[in-house]
Image (cartoon, helix red, strand yellow):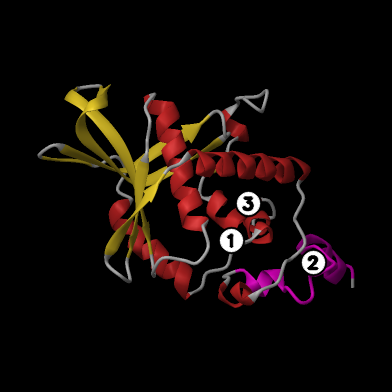
Amino acid sequence: MWMDSNEEDRYLMLSGLQHFQFCKRQWALIHIEQQWEENARTIEGRHLHQKADQPLIKEKRGSKLTVRAMPVQSRELQISGVCDVVELVEDPDGVELAGVDGTYKAYPVEYKRGKPKRGDEDIIQLAAQAMCLEEMMLCRVDKGYLYYHEIRHRVEVAIVDALREQVRQMAREMHHYYDKRHTPKVQTGPFCKNCSLHPVCLPKLMNKRSVQSYIEGRLSE
């Protein structure tokens, strides 16, 4: 384990991994500077999650048990969050569950608006969920699924060791920035125009100044 403390109040949000992969500055603005702005994409995404995010509702159909809004955490990564859906499928090589007959394998399912992205931010988030489930259930989670609303289809994602290591490295870096309360400088790109924090980040203006220093400067005028 790469951190000495396992205090849960130091845990970062699992969903932050997606923000961090998309843009480190966006992650810091949300999780360190507590900035947030809604746009059409974030509103649509929130509505899409409403059906999935019904805390701990369980459905049993045949050999599959579906659990919605399942809280998860990892001491190794020092993160916590909620899986939209965890599908528990009966399997002779699975693990026992309290109060349920048989043995099961776990597969996280994350719901997303739009269609599959060019970047890996959704895959990273799903892999982190799988790693949390592995630690909590003492089992191997070898795959998960991303369901995209626009294409009405789920995409299978293999949770390979290289992906796990990428998540570990990102979690380390996130904790490093968070402990120092450091907001990285902006790295501009075409993706900036679709970011809900564009009005707050002000990428052209903020190349050399943090949002905090900009606000403090305006207040002192």
What residue type is disc 2 on? Ile
Residue 129 lies, in percent from the top left, at: 44, 42
Give the number of the disc on residue 22: 1
Position of 7 with respect to 122 (left or right) is: right
Identify the residue shown where x is 52% and y is 57%.
121
Residue identified by numbered label 3: 31
Q: Which residues are magenta?
A: 197-220
Position of 159 with respect to 148 (left or right) is: right
What residue type is disc 3 on? His
Verify CB contact (< 8 Å) between mark 3 and mark 2. Answer: no
Identify the residue shown where x is 45% and y is 35%.
132
- Label 2 Cα crowd, 10 Å radius (few <14 / some 14-19 / many 20+): few
- Tag 1 or tag 3, which sits nearer the N-term? 1
Callout 2: SS: helix
Which of the image's four quarters has the N terminus? Answer: top right
Residue identified by numbered label 2: 215
Q: Is residue 10 magenta?
A: no
Marks 3/1: CA–CA distance: 14 Å
